Amino acid sequence: MKRLFDFTVSLILFVCLSPIFICIAILVKIKFGSPIIFKQVRPGLYGKPFSLYKFRTMTDEKDEKGQLLPDYIRLTSFGRFLRKYSLDEYPQLWNVIKGDLSLVGPRPLLVEYLSLYTKEQSLRHNVRPGITGWAQVNGRNAISWEEKFKFDIWYVKNQSFFLDIKILFFTAYKVIISDGINQPGNATVESFKGSNSTVGGGNP
């Protein structure tokens, strides 16, 4: 039922929002050049890698040594606008149609984090990752990694169709009010360095 719901809703949104996709793609091309889509390998269900799609929000500016400049410099006002209203996430509807993602589930993080998770934290990969999730409606990037994993694991242990619907409604509200977009003191999100503690719980 979840997969059928994901596929149907994503396909409808993908078709209906295609004019907006095209407009954003044109603006990204003008602002950043090519490529328009940012593609990155992320771990999916049971850690199986897949390519995640997003609209680009940062430039490729580099220093004299050829190293990319810090995120806060490369993240433009247009990029912040896309992130503020989650417009950069729209291409992930194609990930959902393909079966890489679900509409709701723990957010797919970086592949290099896999070796840093505790046994409990690794449970987040027991379900298909999602465009939005329980952690996203409970603080998004404004909460710590420990708190995010706590909410992710709670979702894995308590997932249901009605919980997914609840999360989707909460997500729409969070996007409208632009809540929890950035981690305090950072332009994006600080990298996960690992944890020695086991997390769980996260009751609503």
Image (cartoon, rainbow, N blue to C red):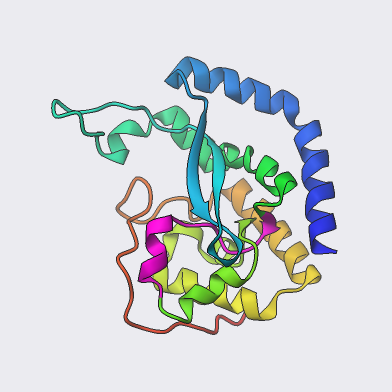
The quadrant of the rendering that contains the N terminus is bottom right
Q: Quadrant of the C terminus?
A: bottom right
Locate residue 81, reporting x and y percent: 50, 34
Res. 144 visible in picture: no
Residue at 71% across / 51% down in the picture?
99
Instruction: Look at the image and tell me whether residue 79 can be seen.
Output: yes
Residue positioned 50% across, 52% down in the render: 42
Q: Image height check: is 140 above or below 17?
A: below
Direction from residue 11 to residue 136 in the image, left or right? left
Q: Is residue 7 above or below residue 147?
A: above
Q: Is residue 187 left or right of residue 27?
A: left
Which residue is farthest top? Answer: 30
Please state which of residues 59 and 2 is positioned toward the viewer in this rendering: 2
Which range is magenta?
Answer: 102-117
Asked whether residue 109 is drawn in magenta, I would say yes
Q: Residue furthest front?
A: 48
Relative horizontal placement of residue 93, taking residue 196 as reference (left or right): right
Residue 113 in magenta? Answer: yes
